[in-house]
Amino acid sequence: MVRLERRLPIRGSPTNPRNARAVAGVFVFACALLLAGCASFWPQTAQLAEGLPPGLPERVELSEVPFFPQVEYQCGPAALATAIVASGVKVTPEELVPQVYLPSRKGSLQIEMMAAARRHGLVSYQLAPRFEDLLRELAAGTPVIVLQNLTLGEGWHYAVAVGYDYPAGKLVLRSGETERQVLPFAAHETFWKRSGYWAMVALPPGRMPATAEEGRWLSSIAALERAGGASGARVAYAAFLERWPDNLGAAIGLANAHHALGELREAERVLRAAERRDPNSAIVLNNLAQTLSDQGRDEEALPFIERAAAAGGPHAAAIEETRRAILERISRKK
Amino acid sequence: MNTAWARGICRLLIVLMALAPYQVAQAGMIGTDQLAAPASQAERDTVLNFVTRGDVARQLQALGLDPADAKDRVAAMTDQEVQALAARIDSLPAGADAVGVLFLILVLAAIWYVWRGGFR
């Protein structure tokens, strides 16, 4: 005690052993905080650092992906054009401005980015919010649009990931006015995390995302079909059924796409196969009856629509309407 | 150990931590999208959609689009997308510009500092 008091005048100097110990303690504590911080700030990067996920190459760069430098605020059209052109469809950012850009928000919404790609015959797919999935799409040769936030506020920004270098821990992007931006995984994650790891790909209908999940990929194809892309949807459903042959929704979708394109024979063939596999599906029975009726084969259609009506369920009203139309056609023929 | 650096990093981490809560987280043919929808729900959706597609097109017009563009844009959306837009078009993020240079430098500095040894 006495000695300490004697040293009072120089307290605060780094040579004071007690003070040095305190500084060291604070330092260790800060390091611990920092390390704990790393894991929580960049959880996916930390996970990736544990090892390259199986099946992925160490380095990928899709150097053939084009670059459209953005003009003011218009990273949405620029990023979308990058992905669309990489999928083999000709388009310019200027043509996409009226399709995705919102003048008074000075930006583009995620939903509109997804929707606009469909207008060019592509299937938009939102990736699962996983860094690994982003790398898998790149490894499969697909550029990925990501939504980042580079500021402390509303600085949302679309960029297109086109490659990575795993040993160096770096991601390569086309971003804004930079043709080849190289960001450490952790930096990208910091910006990307704030959008909830939002990422999308836009693929030609015959190709499937490397990370496609059955249900969500089916919805993505149905979205293209709904947006008027029946011929694209037909191709996409057929590819889907090669991978998941038992998916009833995809069979119904394929038949509907054929029907919309006037290919009634093909629609019938698909629906008959689906009916054999799933004889109690009211939708399959209804659509098969409609397809037969549209070929003038109303008598053949009748037993199917009766079965659909007997199955009941949530589409009873639509089925009853089909049944009435078929009966009317039959009575008109007599 | 440069204490000015440490202080800088600490401040940055505090700012980042404060930001954490803001993370955003045909005639007669029955369509594929109807597969999972229960009847009353399907009907309610149809009625709702009739309203919301027009609503969303009007909202887009209010944000500076001409009517034809707004209509085309809504036509390419799914029902869920239309409803999501109708509910919160003003609060959804709009990707715009790479303006966060300062933030970028801070983050890069922090990452360089912490992971000097490289990724692995």
Image (cartoon, coloured by chain):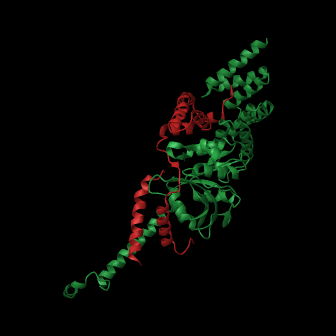
> Chain B rendered in what hue?
red
The mark tally for this picture is 0
A266 up-or-down from A199: above or below: above
User: Which quadrant of the figure has residue B120?
Assistant: bottom right
Residue A60 visible (yes or no):
yes
User: Which quadrant of the figure has residue A188?
Assistant: bottom right
Locate the C terminus of chain A and report the quarter of the image it occupies: top right
B48 with respect to A162 (left or right): left
A111 up-or-down from A1: above or below: above
- The residue located at (54%, 75%) in the rendering is B117
Q: Position of residue A169 (x, y in %)?
A: 59, 68
Farthest-out residue, top: A334
User: Which quadrant of the figure has residue A153?
Assistant: bottom left
A13 with respect to A188 (left or right): left
Q: Position of residue B77 (x, y in %)?
A: 60, 38
B88 and B66: which one is in front? B66
A302 and A195: which one is in front? A195
Residue A215 visible (yes or no):
no
A310 with respect to A28 (left or right): right
Q: Position of residue B16 (x, y in %)?
A: 43, 61
B9 up-or-down from A84: above or below: below
Locate the N terminus of chain A and report the quarter of the image it occupies: bottom left
B86 up-or-down from A174: above or below: above
- The residue located at (67%, 51%) in the rendering is A209
Q: Position of residue A303 (x, y in %)?
A: 74, 22
> Chain A rendered in what hue?
green
A116 and A227: which one is in front? A116
